[in-house]
Image: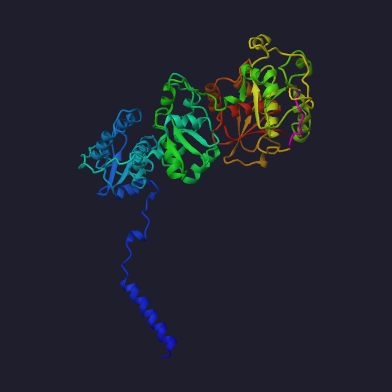
């Protein structure tokens, strides 16, 4: 045998010896715990682990426990824990309560409720907040509903309380809980924060008003807890939840605060975002709207999602004052869409007369419209406030839509009538003087400087071909006139006449009434909504209303 063969033989012997001496691999190192996905377990996993001494099963539905529950499950009065957020329970009391359930380090704690009813997620949050590692906490996906649907056994026999566990509160997990001061700050900074509301739309828009005022926390984003579940009450997939959140404008880099009325429904979007979709920064605001409205400062409360799209006399008077414009300037372009004759009879100081026909005739030619607006004094970097003299009209809505199409930084509508007496109460009078558009002749000159309007047009506002865009969800066409146009659309069509959404004085109807109209017509929350009509102004009114209500994906179809 030559030397190379001897060396190869010795090497193989050494490898074989190492393999013989190596300890055998444990089964769990080669297998995945079937039925466990993150912090969710399926009902079959629970069935296999009913008698596992390392598993504690908690039933979070005290109202139904006596009638039926999973064998071996311990009844938990979850409502006792809710008081903790308002100072009702001490840490010592919570610790003793958890110990009475048999909770100890190293145990897997598996909880369920009736299925998609918020109690299991609230219990999960309470356990997480009080320092039990999240990797030890699991929710039964689909709850008791799914358990029974699969034909698994239930019992009425109460489970005796186990021997006290050894759990101790050593440190509260403040990373999952937000207080009023930080939520108040977050409400004013929606670019970096998202306030996610787990209540239903009736509460959000003010149909249901259990507190002293209807509505929701300013800049709150409606994400109903029920939206996170499938029909069988299991949670939607991580991909579906991330798609939902992205559609609503909720981004992973933001700090999320979930809330509801009193801190229960809020835990569903909390659990879904943090433990299913893997959003890194998610907190529950346990005091929720009750805590917000209890604050002695009488914090603001909204019914519309975007009330700042509507401007009123006092706001506009401030920016129309000569002294303000002389010394501070005004980042506001006031666009009056009335006829030249009506404009000359009296208008807001420093407003620009761009009659509605200018917008109508250039719906299909935004480049030409931009060439007209810049020299007329409309600055794309300003907030453009559109005045019709009668609030929300077809003319003002179409101007709103076209300015959004052109990429105007911000657009709003002036909702009040041009009442001379109302303006005079604030020391400002409507004027007949022409607004001077031209170069400034000195530091105190209040002339409006003409601009070059940039051609940075948005592709997601006005479309001419329905197939040119594809949203995250299927298209739904909203026929916006009195009658549905005879030309058919390739997709679901619902009929919402714009007149059903606007009062006689040109103001939008109350948010709760608008929501009822939309819901009755079958307008879905998750859809690419395309407003259309033989008159683009009618479609534009519905576009504005849907923006006001916070629908994320809306377009106007012009043919």
Majority secondary structure in the magenta region:
loop
Q: In this rendering, is residue 391 above or below 196? A: above
The percent coordinates of residue 441 (x first, y second) are 79, 25
Q: In this rendering, is residue 478 above or below 339? A: below
Asked if the magenta segment contains residue 479, the reply would be no
Q: In this rendering, is residue 35 above or below 351? A: below
Residue positioned 46% across, 32% down in the render: 182
Residue positioned 68% across, 14% down in the render: 418
User: Toward the viewer: 241 or 171?
Assistant: 171
The percent coordinates of residue 150 (x first, y second) are 35, 44
Asked if the magenta segment contains residue 450, the reply would be yes
Residue positioned 41% across, 26% down in the render: 291
Q: Does residue 320 show up?
A: no
Quadrant where the image shows the N terminus:
bottom left
Q: Does residue 254 show up?
A: yes
Specify start and end residues of the magenta stretch as a single range: 446-454
416 relative to 75 in the view: left or right: right
């Amino acid at each position: 045998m030559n030397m190379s063969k001897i060396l190869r033989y010795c090497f193989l012997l050494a490898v074989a010896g190492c393999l013989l001496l190596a300890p055998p691999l444990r089964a769990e190192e080669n297998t995945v715990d079937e039925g466990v996905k993150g912090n969710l377990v399926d009902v079959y996993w629970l069935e296999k682990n009913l008698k596992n001494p390392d598993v504690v099963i908690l039933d979070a539905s005290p109202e139904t426990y006596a009638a039926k529950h999973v064998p071996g499950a311990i009844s938990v009065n979850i409502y006792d824990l809710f008081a903790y957020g308002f100072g009702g329970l001490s840490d010592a009391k919570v610790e003793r309560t958890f110990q009475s359930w048999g909770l100890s380090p190293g145990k897997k704690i598996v909880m369920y409720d009736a299925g998609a009813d918020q109690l299991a997620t609230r219990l999960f949050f309470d356990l997480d907040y009080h320092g039990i590692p999240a990797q030890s906490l699991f929710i039964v996906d689909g709850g008791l509903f799914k358990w029974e649907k699969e034909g698994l056994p239930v019992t009425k026999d109460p489970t005796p309380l186990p021997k006290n566990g050894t759990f101790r509160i050593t440190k509260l997990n403040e990373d999952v809980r937000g207080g009023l001061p930080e939520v108040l700050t977050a409400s004013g900074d929606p670019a970096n924060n998202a306030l996610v509301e787990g209540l239903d739309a009736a509460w959000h828009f003010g149909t249901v008003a259990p507190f002293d005022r209807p509505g929701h926390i300013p800049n709150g984003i409606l994400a109903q807890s029920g939206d996170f579940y499938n029909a069988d009450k299991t949670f939607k997939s991580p991909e579906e939840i991330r798609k939902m959140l992205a559609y609503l404008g909720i981004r992973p880099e933001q700090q999320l605060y979930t809330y509801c009325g009193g801190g229960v429904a809020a835990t569903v979007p909390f659990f879904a975002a943090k433990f299913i979709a893997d959003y890194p920064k998610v907190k529950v605001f346990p005091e929720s709207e009750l805590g917000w409205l209890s604050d002695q400062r009488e914090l603001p409360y909204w019914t519309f999602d975007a009330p700042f799209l509507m401007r009123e006399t006092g706001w506009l008077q401030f920016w129309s004052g000569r002294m303000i414009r002389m010394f501070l300037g005004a980042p506001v372009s006031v666009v009056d869409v009335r006829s030249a004759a009506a404009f000359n009879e009296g208008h807001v100081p420093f407003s620009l007369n761009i009659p509605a026909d200018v917008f109508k005739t250039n719906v299909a030619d935004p480049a030409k419209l931009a060439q007209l607006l810049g020299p007329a004094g409309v600055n794309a970097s300003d907030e453009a406030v559109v005045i019709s003299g009668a609030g929300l009209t077809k003319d003002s809505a179409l101007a709103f839509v076209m300015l959004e199409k052109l990429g105007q930084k911000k657009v709003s509508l002036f909702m009040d009538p041009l009442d001379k007496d109302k303006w005079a109460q604030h020391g400002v009078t409507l004027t007949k003087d022409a607004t001077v558009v031209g170069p400034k002749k000195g530091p105190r000159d209040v002339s409006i400087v003409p601009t070059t309007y940039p051609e940075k047009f948005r592709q997601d506002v006005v479309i001419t071909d329905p197939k040119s865009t594809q949203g995250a969800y299927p298209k739904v066409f909203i026929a916006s006139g009195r009658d549905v146009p005879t030309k058919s659309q390739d997709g679901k069509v619902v009929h919402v006449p714009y007149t059903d959404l606007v009062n006689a004085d040109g103001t939008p109807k109350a948010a709760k009434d608008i929501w009822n109209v939309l819901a009755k017509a079958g307008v879905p929350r998750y859809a690419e909504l395309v407003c259309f009509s033989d008159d683009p102004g009618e479609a534009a009114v519905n576009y504005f209303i849907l923006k006001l209500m916070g629908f994320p994906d809306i377009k106007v179809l012009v043919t």
